[in-house]
Image (cartoon, helix red, strand yellow):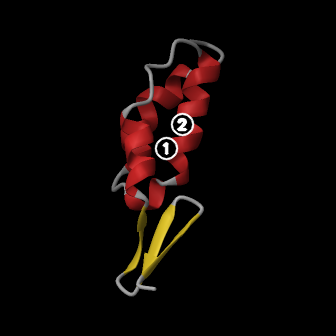
Amino acid sequence: MSEVKFLGHVISHEGISVDPAKIEVVLEWERPRNVTEVRSFLGLAGYYRRFVQDFSRIALPLTKLTRKDV
């Protein structure tokens, strides 16, 4: 066995990467229409933050949309 898929990750002798099927889920995610849907998307995307350089900066505009004063 050269690789194992576990909790949305692919673990191999080369290291850990995101399961390509999960990348497809993120890319095909429908545009959020309310705060709950924005939070849901941020939860999914945040799970893979370690694989996205500057994730916090990229996600900041969406995070701001979840504030009560918006």
Name the residue type under label 1.
Ala
The answer to which image quadrant residue 61 occupies is top left
Image position, residue 20 (x, y; %): 37, 55
Residue under numbered circle 2: 42
| Secondary structure beneath label 2 | helix
Residue 44 in sight in this render: yes
**Residue 19 position (above or below residue 22):** below
- Circle 2 packing at 10 Å, graded few (<14), some (14-19), many (20+), is some
Disc 2 to disc 1, C-alpha distance: 5 Å
Residue under numbered circle 1: 45
* Nearer to the camera, 21 or 38: 21
Residue 67 in sight in this render: no
Whether pointer 2 and pointer 1 mark residues with C-beta atoms closer than 8 Å, the reply is yes
Picture residue at 54% right of the left edge, 36% below the top: 42
**Residue 20 position (above or below residue 16):** above
| Secondary structure beneath label 1 | helix
Picture residue at 35% right of the left edge, 51% below the top: 54
Name the side, left or right, on which 64 lies relative to 18: right
Extreme-front residue of the structure: 1
